[in-house]
Image (cartoon, helix red, strand yellow):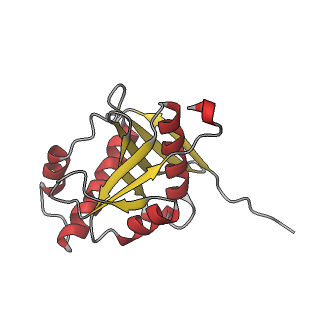
Amino acid sequence: MTVTARPTWSISATRPDQPDAVHLLREHMTEMVVRYHRRPALPGEVDAALAEMPSDDLTHPSGLLLLAHHGPELAGCAGLRWQSGWAELTRVFVRPEHRGAGGGAALLAAVEQAARAAGVDRIRLDTRNDLVEARALYARHGYVEISAYSSGPYADHWFQKELTYASEGAK
């Protein structure tokens, strides 16, 4: 009998200007544009969206960008922006061919671990009405809907998760 091992998820930090990060962030924004407008992206539209909502602050000291690999394949990303006492989750994306294999959960676990290591006590995020899968993912992982904390043009729902620590003295 032959047993095929399932690929595992590995997560690592990177800079948003690195080629793999640039590629994934562009894929993420392309999907956001297409889903928002419910049509193919027009020429220049993704570039305009990337300029409107840059990711260059997802690096030390203002943030963090994580890339996920599913086995050897580049499969997703997630970012954190450091705020005073909390972090904002952004750019959560798993390539379509890797969805349903635990990548979203792996990315959330990794950003939560990074936030705890930075001494952050909660993570917040905003998302759109049309991103129903993302909203379901956040709810499954303990993020609860809260009042608006931001007023961005694409923010329809706001979530927060209070981070727990292994022991009271660990924080």
Which quarter shows the C terminus? top right
Q: Quadrant of residue 93?
A: bottom left
Decide: is 103 above or below 60: below
Q: Residue furthest front?
A: 168
Residue at image coords 80%, 64%: 3
Visible in this render: residue 73? no
Decide: is 155 above or below 54: below
Which quarter shows the N terminus? bottom right
Q: Residue furthest top?
A: 61
Provide residue 61's location: percent of width, then percent of height. Answer: 35, 25
Provide residue 156's location: percent of width, then percent of height. Answer: 24, 64
- 148 and 57: which is toward the camera: 148
- 72 and 52: which is toward the camera: 52
Provide residue 75's location: percent of width, then percent of height. Answer: 48, 53
In-image side of 23 versus 167 (left or right): left
Q: Residue furthest bottom?
A: 38
Q: Residue furthest right?
A: 1
In-image side of 24 versus 3 (left or right): left
Residue at image coords 50%, 44%: 112
| Numbered label tally | 0
Decide: is 43 above or below 88: below
Residue at image coords 32%, 42%: 22
Visible in this render: residue 146? yes
Q: Quadrant of residue 14?
A: top left
Residue at image coords 54%, 40%: 113
Provide residue 46's location: percent of width, then percent of height. Answer: 19, 54
